[in-house]
Image (cartoon, grey):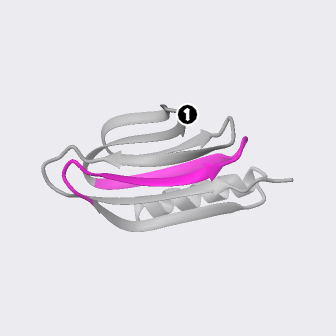
Amino acid sequence: MSLIRFTLFSFIFVLIAGGCASVDVKEKETETIKPSGVHEDCMELLKGQTLDYSFDSSKPLNFNIHYHEDHNVSYVVQKDGISSDHGTYNSGKKQYYCLMWTNSNSEPVKLKYAYGKSKKQD
C-alpha cells in the first residue's frame, strides 16, 4: 500500500473514531506540473471544518494552503522545497482555501495527492 493511501486511510479512521460523522475525500492519482508551473485545488471550508491532506512528488516542490480576501492572499500553511507532506488544517472561518504546489525545477514533476474534509455537522 502506498504511503499516500496509508495516510489517507489513517486520517479517515482518526476522523471517524474522533466523532466526525462523515468525511468528503478527494484523491488524485497523478498530476504533472511543468517547469515553473503550478497546480492548484480549491474548496470551500466552513468555520470549524478540518482539512487533512497528503502528497508525494518526484522532486521537491513549494507547497502552500492559502485563501484570497479582498486584494490580499493569506497563507495558512507554507513549506518550500519538499517532496512529501501530510497535515491537518482547522478552518477558523468560512472561506475558499486552495492547496497549491509550485514547480521551481527545470523539468516536469509528478505529483500525487489526496485530501479529505470533515462534513459540517448540525
| Horizontal arrangement in the rendering, residue 40 relative to residue 8 (left or right) | left
Vertical order, 105 against 24 (above or below):
above
Q: Residue 15: give x, y in percent of width and height.
A: 69, 53
| Residue 36 lies in the magenta-colored region | yes
- Disc 1 crowd rating (10 Å Cα; few below 14, some 14-19, many 20+) is few
Q: Residue 26: give x, y in percent of width and height.
A: 54, 64
Viewer-nearest residue: 94 or 101: 94
Q: What's the magenta region? A: 33-57
Decide if residue 84 is in sight here.
no
Q: Residue 79: give x, y in percent of width and height.
A: 38, 35
Q: Quadrant of residue 32?
A: bottom left
Residue lying furthest front in this view?
Answer: 71
| Residue 67 lies in the magenta-colored region | no
Vertical order, 74 against 2 (above or below):
above
| Horizontal arrangement in the rendering, residue 3 relative to residue 110 (left or right) | right
Viewer-nearest residue: 43 or 112: 43
| Horizontal arrangement in the rendering, residue 4 relative to residue 25 (left or right) | left
Vertical order, 74 against 12 (above or below):
above
Which residue is at a point 44% across and 66% down the rendered structure image? Answer: 28
Q: Quadrant of residue 33?
A: bottom left
Which residue is at a point 42% across and 34% down the rendered structure image? Answer: 78
Residue lying furthest left in this view?
Answer: 106
Position of the N terminus, as image quadrant, is bottom left
Label 1: which residue?
70
Q: Residue 8: give x, y in percent of width and height.
A: 53, 59
Kindly report the secondary structure that dominates the magenta region of the rendered protein.
Answer: strand
Number of disc labels: 1
Which residue is at a point 55% across and 33% down the rendered structure image? Answer: 70
Which residue is at a point 64% across and 62% down the rendered structure image? Answer: 24
Q: Amino acid at mark 1?
A: Asp
Decide if residue 56 is in sight here.
yes
* Secondary structure of the residue carrying numbered label 1: loop
